[in-house]
Image (tube, rainbow, N blue to C red):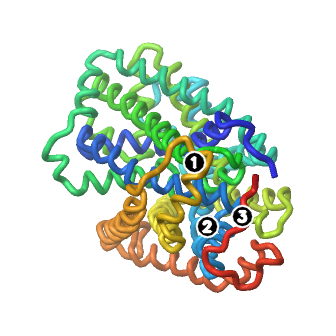
Amino acid sequence: MSRFSSRWGMMLAMLGMAVGTGNIWRFPRIAATNGGGSFLVAWVTFLLLWSIPLILVEFAMGRRTRYGAVGAFSRLVGPKFAWMGAWIAWTATAIMFYYTVVMGWTLRYFWAAVTGQLSGAEPGALWGSFAYTPQVLIYHAIAMALAGFVVARGVKGIERAASILIPSLFVLVVVLTLKAVTLPNASAGLNFLFTPSWEGLADHRVWLAALTQNAWDTGAGWGLILTYSIYMRQREDAALNAFMLGFGNNAVSLMAGIMVLCTVFSIMPGAADQIVGAGNEGLTFIWVPQLFQQMAGGRFFMSLFFLALVFAAWTSLISMIELATRVLVDGGLRRGRALALVVTAGFLLGIPSALSENIFANQDWVWGVGLMVSGLFFAIAVIRYGTTRFREELINTEHSDIRIGRWWDWAIRFVVLQAVVLILWWLFSVGREDPWGPYGLFNTLLQWAIALTIFLALNRWMVRRTRPEVERAEAPEGAMPPAIP
């Protein structure tokens, strides 16, 4: 089996998986609409209470089992629980179907920025004539082809792409951040972002928003880290890697927040509330071009911004395609055929989201909230295996530079509570307004029920496909394969 050539190569690939468009377009908006500095306090807290504990679980499971989500759950928790791994794999794959559309948007806007099409244009003119039209299908296809091209070259291709795209992304974000903080009155944006208030810290909505942001932008609980961890060297330190990944990912989010908010408070302070409340698409594709147009060298910096978005979307899409491909390979398909199936399905099943705003919003909602269920399943897997046993056997190995203490045992149990609270809060705070609408409670639960029914019905079949012949008999729960050097 192929391996990442070094820790540096592996961490770049992992950062490529974690750093996506959500870091650059969602974080600034969520931070701004939830009190700025107060949100940051809660955000860092949940990095340690949600993201890092789950990242550790995924690193350990992937390295130990050398299987994707379905096979890893079957081996770690027992053959009766392969359906949990299937849910995790499906949720990330369902997100892939519309995430290719997002990357297509970034490609279109990068080209428009480079060619000057956005310069002098009315706010939202390009978005209004482009979004959810047949034009999107061209860029949707290009996005899927670019990501599939990298995955077709295996682990070496993923590592090579990440070694170029991620350093480039960091340079672009740093340049844009430095430009933003040197604008007149940029200090107003910094003060807003870094000054907490007691009122904000006492608001439960700020804490729930911070927990949600951690669940959505670090990649923890998606199954993506587990997939890449299959290709880790056995001697890698899961604990050190988890902290590096979590803090590296959030550093990009923080720079994106500084970049956007300093620019908003400097150039259009009177419209700050309208800009940050415009939603992900509105902030990125309507307001950001307007902001850059009003600064010196705006066309150049606008091009850099959308190029950074392209790189972020590309590396994340690569990891989603690899996850789905790996699950099919574990099930017995040859890699080339598995990849062709994933890329074809990704394009075809992404068409509805490319052409309909309601379908896009619905799928983003249904499977975005579904990620909380995925995080819950990872925590349940550890508890069934034994939290202390998991920590001592799979995390604190003989090659660990950092040893994880008993705090992690309690953090994993707390993840269960966090996941349940998040799921209920999102479903009932939004879903009750129009139960059958794009964000509807019944709409969401129906799609979840269909997926879970299928996975439960196919559980035994999935176990037979993902476990070697000698282990197809009912193995005791917690039985593990021998370590792979």
Q: Nearer the viewer, residue 357 or 163?
A: 163
How packed mark 1 is, by other alpha carbons closer than 10 Å (few <14, some 14-19, many 20 or more), is many
**Amino acid type indicated by mark 3:** Val
Q: From the viewer's perspective, is 393 left or right of 217?
A: right
Query: Are the residues flagged by discs 3 and 2 in contact, CB closer than 8 Å?
Result: no
As measured in the structure, the alpha-carbon distance from the residue carrying label 2 to the one carrying label 1 is 25 Å
Label 1 secondary element: helix
How packed mark 2 is, by other alpha carbons closer than 10 Å (few <14, some 14-19, many 20 or more), is many
Q: Which mark is residue 327?
A: 3
Q: Along the polypeptide, which appears first: circle 1 or circle 3? A: 1
**Amino acid type indicated by mark 2:** Trp
For residue 104, say whether it is visible: no
Vertically, is 272 above or below 237?
Answer: above
**Amino acid type indicated by mark 1:** Ala
Q: Residue at x 40, y 57 (%)?
A: 406
As measured in the structure, the alpha-carbon distance from the residue carrying label 1 to the one carrying label 3 is 22 Å
- Horizontal and vertical percent position of residue 94: 59, 63
Q: Quadrant of residue 106?
A: top right
Which one is closest to the eye, mark 2 or mark 1? 1
Label 3 secondary element: helix
Label 2 secondary element: helix
